[in-house]
Image (cartoon, rainbow, N blue to C red):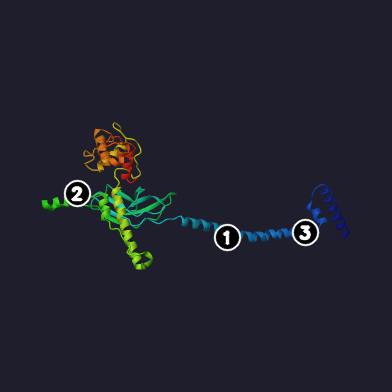
Amino acid sequence: MRKSLRKLKEKTIEKIHQYCTNKFCWYKFWDEHPWSYFIHWLIFFIFIAGMIIFLPWVSTVELWKADIVSTSVTVISFPAPTDLTATAVSSSRIDLAWSSVSGAVSYKVYREGLFIGSSTATFYSDTGLNSSTNYSYTVLAVNVFGGKSEQSSSVLATTQSIGGGGGAIYVPPEEEVVEEEVEEVAEEEKTVAEKLAEIPIPVLEKPIKEMTIAEIKKAITEIVTVINQLKALLAKITATVPAIPTEYKFEKTLKYGQTLKDVEYLQEFLKAQGTEIYPEGIVSGWFGPLTKAAVIRFQEKYVSDILAPWGLTKGTGLVGSTTRAKLNTLLGK
């Protein structure tokens, strides 16, 4: 029996050898090189050990990358606007102002949690409101990548009332009315230089290195107060015209006979300058003789900025480069 099995084994091996004569055969290789079994098993175990060690390391690298991304997002974030104020100007308008945010290119304004408009400046006028009504406002900043800050703290303002009902209306004596009107006119006629002169500029009584911490804090508070006063004055100088979009800028040459949306914005601007510039106050979009006369008055009011560069002293009625530059400057552009 054993001889038969041995012969069968030898016969089988001989056939395998014959089959593998001209081809690479693992069986023949292992039969001729018994040590190769050890090499193959060693490679297999090294592969398994490598997978056990490598896979946890890959997970660690992925977590490390995720941590870097999270850190990057935190670095580029920026704070919400501060010092938000809301002032009721009339029964249908509330003016907002806030401190600028470093890195912000625009600001989004929200009323009662709903978006109402954007501004590239640090102020905004909300119009078309109901009289004697409370409104809540917040503002957020937007950077050049479209990223948004958190919303600012909310502020409340109440529009002015149109007039009371059901009772007698108090009419002040004529002397009081005249006195109030004179005070208002005197305030309006103050020049920017006069208003600047009224702002007290803090002076350090001794060098900073000789000051105590309390004295330094007091000096900083005084300086911040002056900065806020200057910001408020600047906001009045560059006050927006509600009917003109905040992002609009005068870029086209405007002249007599044109009918354009730009002419309509020009008329709105001239109307906001008062009756001394545009007494008719007509807003039609057509550049007619009344609009031309208003442009001439505006040019002659700012003769040094608009006409002097051309050697002129009389207005032309043509809204050219220097006239547009002055318009945009007064709009805060």
Residue sitting farthest toward the right: 3
Which image quarter holds the N terminus? bottom right
Disc 2 residue type (three-letter): Val
Q: Give the mark nearest the N terminus, 3 or 1.
A: 3
Secondary structure beneath dot 1 equals helix
Does residue 68 appear in this view? yes
| Mark 3: secondary structure | helix
Above or below for 252 versus 76: above
Mark 3 vs mark 1, CA separation in Å: 36 Å
The reply, left or right, for residue 241 in relation to residue 149 is left
Which residue is labeled 2 in the image? 185
Q: Nearer the viewer, mark 2 or mark 3?
A: 2
Which amino acid type is shown beneath numbered disc 1?
A: Thr
Query: Which x, y percent locates residue 319?
Result: 31, 36
Secondary element under disc 2, as helix, strand or loop, is helix
Q: CA distance from mark 2 to mark 1?
A: 73 Å
- Residue 51's spot in the image, x, y percent? 65, 59
User: Would you name the residue on which mark 3 appears?
Assistant: 37
Q: Nearer the viewer, residue 116 or 122?
A: 122
* Residue named by callout 1: 60
Crowdedness of circle 1 by 10 Å Cα count: few (<14), some, many (20+)? few
